[in-house]
Image: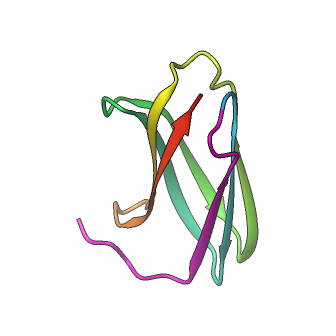
Amino acid sequence: MKTILMKLKVIVSPSPFTSELLIYIHGHFAMNIVIRLSNGKGTVIRITACALKKGENKVRIANLQRYAGGNYQLVIKLLNGDLVETIDLIKI
């Protein structure tokens, strides 16, 4: 799997998180992505597909309070599997 070079800025808030994540994505073109949130054991606990428009985008992942605290990883990929961004997170 290769990492693709794109003009894409990703900000995740809050960090650390408790019950929800807000993902701000700014890109210079439209694209379709898949966002996966995995726990420290590698188990995918949430997956969502998004159609991003050119410019500012906001994706909300809610109802995370039922999951245990610890290390998590947010992975953003294109629909063809190319990696866009990987972000390590902490849940409290």
Image x and y of residue 39, in percent: 41, 31
Picture quarter with the N terminus: bottom left
For this rendering, which residue is in front, 4 or 86?
86
Q: Which residue is situated farthest in the top direction here?
A: 66
Image x and y of residue 16, in percent: 62, 40
84 lies left or right of 29: left
For this rendering, which residue is in front, 36 or 14?
14
Q: Main secondary structure of the magenta part?
A: loop
In percent of the image, x 69 and y 34: which residue is there?
Answer: 20
56 lies left or right of 51: right
83 lies left or right of 26: left
Q: Can you say whether 50 is above or below 4 in the image?
A: above
Q: Is residue 7 magenta?
A: yes
Q: Which residues are magenta?
A: 1-17
In percent of the image, x 26 and y 71: which residue is there?
Answer: 2
Picture quarter with the C terminus: top right
Q: Which residue is situated farthest in the left direction here?
A: 1
Which color mode does the image show?
rainbow
Q: Which quadrant of the structure image shows residue 58?
A: bottom right
Q: Is residue 13 magenta?
A: yes
Q: Can you say whether 46 is above or below 1 in the image?
A: above
Q: Which quadrant of the structure image shows residue 54?
A: bottom right
For this rendering, which residue is in front, 7 or 32?
7
Image x and y of residue 5, in percent: 41, 82
In percent of the image, x 61 and y 73: which residue is there?
Answer: 9
Image x and y of residue 38, in percent: 42, 36
Count of numbered labels shown in the rendering: 0
